[in-house]
Image (tube, helix red, strand yellow):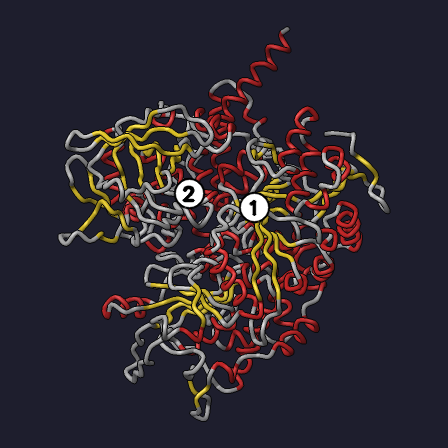
Amino acid sequence: MNTKYRKNLPGTDLDYFDVRAAVEDIQPGAYDKLPFTSRVLAENLVRRCEPERLTDSLKQIIERKRDLDFPWYPARVVCHDILGQTAFVDLAGLRDAIAERGGDPAKVNPVVPTQLIVDHSLAVEHAGFEKDAFEKNRAIEERRNEDRFHFINWTKKAFENVDVIPPGNGIMHQINLERMSPVVHSVDGVAFPDTLVGTDSHTPHVDALGVIAIGVGGLEAESVMLGRPSYMRLPDIIGVELTGKPAPGITCTDIVLALTEFLRKERVVSAYLEFYGEGAEALSVGDRATISNMTPEFGATAAMFHIDQQTLDYLTLTGREPEQVDLVEKYARTAGLWGDDLKGAEYERVLTFDLSTVVRNMAGPSNPHKRVATTDLAKAGIAGEVEQRDDGLMPDGAVIIAAITSCTNTSNPRNVIAAGLLAQKANELGMTRKPWVKTSLAPGSKAVQYYLEDAGLLPELEKLGFGIVAFACTTCNGMSGALDPKIQQEIIDRDLYSTAVLSGNRNFDGRIHPYAKQAFLASPALVVAYAIAGTVRFDIEKDALGTDKDGNPVTLKDLWPSDEEIDRIVAEHVKPDHFRKVYIPMFEKKVEKAEQVSPLYDWRPQSTYIRRPPYWEGALAAERTLKGMRPLAILPDNITTDHLSPSNAIMPDSAAGEYLAKMGLPEEDFNSYATHRGDHLTAQRATLANPKLFNEMVRDENGEVKQGSLARLEPEGKVMRMWDVIETYMERKQPLIIVAGADYGQGSSRDWAAKGVRLAGVEAIVAEGFERIHRTNLVGMGVLPLQFQEGTTRKTLGLDGTETYDVEGDLAPGATVTLIVNRRDGGREEVPVICRLDTAEEVSIYEAGGVLQRFAQDFLEAEAEEQQGRRA
């Protein structure tokens, strides 16, 4: 820790690091021009960087250079139970590997405070219209996940610096926003900004508080947990000026869906966004969080708001202690992080978005950035003539799932209250949900239940089938649960176009439910409206949703609450006591006698959830030659991590389903792919298992690409199920490559999207471009990411999958290396590609075989040096 710039924080007995002075010593007048993000990154350097590196590292920030790496030390790591659990499975495996090589496994611990929240493992098997749905769903969750929860309980006792929030308490991002983030830390007498990485791509949710929080894969999180800095170069920081104010009746969901479309078109991939301007200042933190939560859908890394009075009001509303609120204000004003102090900030690129232009919106089908105004549903081919049926059968476009889900919207009281008021008006008119719609309400925090009860709106939602089924991610994470068997069979028999409408952040093909052919994102109030209508094949702005008790048609405008109604309910019924009631018991430190457990986990050999990982043995310990690689798949643009490793329900005819049946698991307990990621034997069978996949190596007799989890075994040319091809190549020890288009690896920060291909024998991915988190995960697994140069694609090269590939050249950050394409006819083509090992640290990790192998090497070397020092 540097002491030169350590000073007293005025009005407190704490110190802080005077970053302004450090910056001005290098370049006078520079600090006032720095964006918020740069100021926080500079503080991290001044407080944590080695003194001899400080000046050069700060210059990177001050002079907006991007040619050198500098270290970033996040203050916290936050995990959900899927990636968090798999991260700790990796660390437990690492302990085994250390012990086998003579090291002390008990020394392998997170050195950065790590919070693990169990929120991703509950499926909505019992819908919101069923009695005691919450208790029934929790009981199923406990039964199905006994192996996982046993391991997580061991984790809490066996590792230092780990806090676990058990299941049934809420979603990691909402808990982080409402309680876990202090905004400003006070540790060992020093105040400094909260910063964190989280094992979920929606971790930027708390960027709304002025906290740099970014989503990373489990592998990068493991590295940060173990005390290694996250090396970075100055990110592209883009200013987004928000002007105007929303029109009456427009929710923040409408705003964020319009922003998602706008920012995707502006190509903000990997950038840090900073929202400012009169429009941003007027947004509540609830509204800001709805926007920040959708950061990965923009393609960005972070979506920052400045600290201001809205921040303080929110901290007070959510029950933070007055002393903490006061510290946040004093620190932000002193350190230049207060909104008014950023008026002179200069951005290399500025975008302007007028909030007054936003209309009522949905997104879909299939992509969160595919906005469609509700007035344009017919033009977009979504709405059509309403199918009137009197035979009790579902109509075309039936909504089979309507879910108020996800921290995106349930952390915003205005959005939830609007849904409750719409339900209240519908009930007054005698309207009901359609019988084929599986409805659910899964808030990200128990505080939502308390303020809905306080306002008398929870019973209104329950009457329409939106009873609370969980405090967890549920439908947004693909955990929609089973459909009524009769409804499912009707969908199959009639090949029905069935859909889901949810208030979440992801609607990729195949994610929400195997029988929901497409899915739409919408505000919670619109979710309720679609449950009443029961179909997407109608014009929601013009057509009747249904009829009242007297047979009169009812339209959306008859039900939509006014802004004044919403604001009144929020002001009267959302109270600090609701949040204190939830979080004081959750986080109070209980004095318990620490139970001693072994530092090595006692692996259960028959478990299909938790298994000792194989990353230090067999093929994974062998050298990657980058020679003679055969393509496993040639893929189009916009491949998501859901394509690479789906998270939804496991079907019995899938490779994973067949394996689980063989292991003796009953079909009703197959659970989701996501929950089995602690067992590599199950999880690797999810590799490229999405039924919506298009592998361009597999075509029909007309030359059209066939949809499905399919691959072509070479040199035989035989089309088979993807897993069967992978298994055959594994037996042959055949090195593999994947060729892809643009934006490869969009979506969730899913380390199994990298682990799965590595276990399959994939040594390199060559694509037109990579999403940030997935590229990092590939490096962390020892898979080489290569990028085609501008103008070169799989199509310009005429690749068909019969080729083999070699890579030649020295691997260095940004270096041009050669991809050699060996054609079946004996031809040989040399293609220059860009090495996407972006930092020297990434080169080091790749050369070691991955982040875990690198840590094991460093740990054992340090232990050997320590022992040698003791002997000397």
Kindly report which numbered mark, 1 or 2, lies closer to the viewer in this rendering.
Answer: 2
Q: Which residue is mark 1?
A: 214
Name the residue furthest top: 872
Q: Name the residue rendered at 63%, 11% in the picture.
A: 869
Q: Which of the marked residues, 1 or 2, is nearer the chain's N terminus?
A: 1
Of residues 84 and 340, which is closer to you in this image? 340
Query: Relative to residue 379, is residue 161 drawn left or right?
Result: right
For residue 13, which quarter of the picture? Answer: top right
Relative image position of residue 305 (x, y in whole percent): 64, 54
For residue 762, which quarter of the picture? Answer: top left
Relative image position of residue 628 (x, y in whole percent): 26, 28
Q: Which residue is mark 2?
A: 770
Disc 1 crowd, CA 10 A, few/some/many (<14, 14-19, 20+): many
Give the residue type that dot 2 points to: Phe
Do the numbered discs 1 and 2 sit on residues whose CB atoms are within 8 Å?
no
In 3D space, how far apart are the residues under numbered discs 1 and 2 (Cα atoms)? 17 Å
Relative image position of residue 658 (x, y in whole percent): 27, 47
From what the image shows, is residue 312 above or below residue 11?
A: below
Give the residue type that dot 1 points to: Ile
